[in-house]
Image: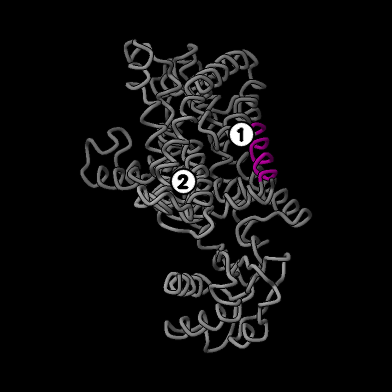
Amino acid sequence: MMKYLQNIGRSLMLPVAVLPAAAILMGIGYWIDPSGWGADNALAAFLIKAGSSIIDNMAFLFAVGVALGMSKDRDGSAALSGLVAFLVVTTILSTDSVAMLQGTEPENVNAAFEKINNQFIGILSGLIAAIMYNRFSHVQLPDALAFFSGKRLVPIMTAVSMLAISGILFFIWPVIFSGLVSFGTAISKLDFIGAGLYGFFNRLLIPTGLHHALNSVFWFDVAGINDIGNFWAGTGEKGVTGMYQAGFFPVMMFGLPAAALAMYHTAKTKRKKQAASLLLAAGFASFFTGVTEPLEFSFMFLAPALYVVHAALTGLSLAAAAFFHWTAGFGFSAGFVDFVLSSRLPLANMPYMLLLQGLIVAVIYYVLFRTLIVKFNLKTPGREEEQLQADGPSLNSGSRFEHTAAVIYDGLGGGANVISVDNCVTRLRVEVRDMESVDQEKIKSTGVPGIHIVGPHSIQVIVGTNVQFVADEIARLRKKHA
């Protein structure tokens, strides 16, 4: 199970990599026009829309990225099937479609279906598409249906599967969503303890998209709290209104960036630069804009236990801020931009104490993350695979990639012996029919750092950070000789 979750995390790295830049664009746009969000400034509108085109469609990216990464050949038809899966479920379970299915008006449809377009559904769609690809991509149909054989069959079977899943979600999604709304209403009566519980479950539910159910209770007017609206309108109680927002600032501005630093410091030595490029951008996005998904999704599946720790620390931060009545608010998210904008509002109560709290939270995050990562060898960014990079001329140019791939492929036994080829960050992961047919000396002659036998039919060839190009050439060879 843990390996499966880590494979999901690895698959998410491609779409996650683009999120920090999008978040920063939105943050700058919101900084330029904090009240109109682009309505009063063309440059702000341009930046916000450019960033939101990605941030608001994370679920699409996850559906495609997970389908591509979890499929055995990383083939484009798997990615297409991930998109098909997502479109099927989100269209069938959209508010208008559900209204027709129930024979009612859209305004009478459960609010849960307004939130069906979320990251959880995206990941689920990608997983179903990958499963369908791995199962049906080589199926041969009778001659009369031969056109739909193989990879063309994958999106068809994916769509059929998502029809069944949509039927299940039609009944269980609103029950879960409504249950969380009721739960949120109940804990809202527990003062600072309720704020802490809300913070914990808010983060814990991020991967499922169901955090929106809790947010609707505390941030908006579902249960009469309307924490965001009242704070910005100045109509609440000083030191109380904003209690469901304030504790996020220390986490997003200080805690998560400190966690990113801990993950960078514990990354494998030769992978620090690669890890830094993601963690630096994601950490800055969290601090400046309060958009945390780029950083959270970078480790929530790779090290789920660490993500639970993050959720618990978020809950403690909200509870502490609510207990001391330190308040600030946000319109976009709990980053630097909103902190500056909200700190001068009438209901902001000792907001600068949140910065002091943030420094303490940063130390706790850094120490805990670094200790847990090292002690339990958690596979955070930069630690997924041992970094071994080949030195030498055989991996330095396009023509050398072709030669290296050809020699490795031949050493593996060629098309007669190779069942599948995948790659992670540094290694070729190969399934073979007969391990005795593998010529390890021939493979090593290319200058690769090593070979690792992981099972009777599984072998890994350690290539280095250029492994993708070698894998692409091997894929071409397989298609050529298919």
Q: Residue 304, can we see it?
A: yes
Q: Measured from the top left, where is residue 470 in percent x and y?
A: 50, 75
Q: Does residue 152 appear to the left or right of 400 in the view shown?
A: left
Asked where in the image residue 52 lies, by quadrant, the reply is: top left
**Looking at the rendering, in which quadrant would you find the C terminus?**
bottom left
Residue holding disc 1: 204
Disc number placed over residue 443 in the picture, else none:
none
User: In terms of secondary structure, where does tag 1 sit?
Assistant: helix
Q: Measured from the top left, where is residue 51 in percent x and y?
A: 34, 47
Q: Residue 23, can we see it?
A: no
Query: What residue range appears in magenta?
Result: 304-316
Disc number placed over residue 62 in the picture, else none:
2
Look at the picture and state if 95 lies above or below 268: above
Look at the picture and state if 99 lies above or below 326: above
Name the residue: 50% across, 62% down: 277
Q: Tally the marks.
A: 2
Q: Is residue 460 magenta?
A: no
Look at the picture and state if 96 lies above or below 472: above
Which amino acid, mark 2? Phe
Asked where in the image residue 40 lies, by quadrant, the reply is: top left
Relative to the observer, which residue lies in front, 139 or 170? 139
- Which residue is at the far front? 143
Mark 2–mark 1 Cα distance, whole angstroms, equals 18 Å
Principal secondary structure, stretch drawn in magenta: helix
Name the residue: 46% across, 21% down: 112
